[in-house]
Amino acid sequence: MSTHPVVYVLNGPNLNLLGKRQPDIYGHETLADVEASCAAKAQALGLTMAFHQSNHEGEIVETIHRARDEAAAIVINPAAYTHTSVAIMDALLAFEGPIIEVHLSNVHRREEFRSHSWVSKAATGVICGLGSRGYILALDAVADLLGTEAG
């Protein structure tokens, strides 16, 4: 069993279609590409990563509940649930470690409804508009906040 802090990287609905769905907005990388990049970065930072994706709100809530016992931090791209899910916000508010909210696109340059985030109410920080690089920056932030940054 690893002695490295565990970080959950959570992904919401439709991110399983990354690389195929609206590549002009979300890019050509697949979620598997993002997972591989995150795994390499987490390892370099001395973190153990658990990567999850679900199209179901309740499953995301249950994963956050598991994180309370298993993870030191959460990186979350809640996708469309960002703007609608009080349940995900409440689950995150019950988590005691750092939470970094990530969005591939700059949600503030898109439709007005995307500017509101329930998740931000629970997040330590928010990264948006930098594509998949946002996940890497989020892992850097987590390592720094946990004091595990390998340098």
Image (spheres, rainbow, N blue to C red):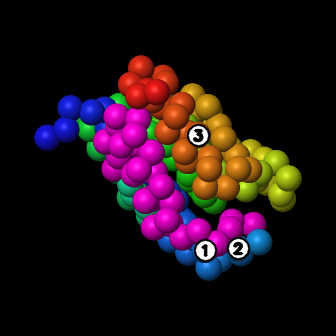
Please report the bounds of the magenta region as a residue range.
25-50
Q: Amino acid at mark 1?
A: Gly
Establish if 43 lies above or below 123: below
Q: Contact (CB < 8 A) between labels 2 and 1?
A: yes
Establish if 126 lies above or below 105: above
Which residue occupies the foreground of this view, 148 or 82? 148
The local crowd at label 2, few if under 14, some if 14 to 19, many if 20 or more residues have their Cα within 10 Å, is few
Q: Amino acid at mark 3?
A: Leu
- 31 in magenta: yes
Whether residue 9 is visible: no
Give the label on residue 151, or none.
none
**Residue 118 in the image: x percent, y percent?**
63, 42
The residue tagged with tag 3: helix, strand or loop? helix
Establish if 52 lies above or below 123: below
Establish if 150 lies above or below 111: above
**Residue 147 in the image: x percent, y percent?**
42, 20
Report the residue marked by disc 3. 137
Q: Amino acid at mark 2?
A: Pro
Report the residue marked by disc 1. 19
Report the residue marked by disc 2. 23
Q: Main secondary structure of the magenta part?
A: helix
Q: Residue at x 62, y 47 (%)?
A: 134
Residue 80 left/right relative to 41? right
Q: How many marks?
A: 3
Task: Indicate the quadrant containing the N terminus: top left, top right, bottom left or bottom right.
Answer: top left
Q: Contact (CB < 8 A) between labels 3 and 2?
A: no
Of mark 3 and mark 2, the one earlier in the sequence is 2
Q: Residue at x 46, y 51 (%)?
A: 38
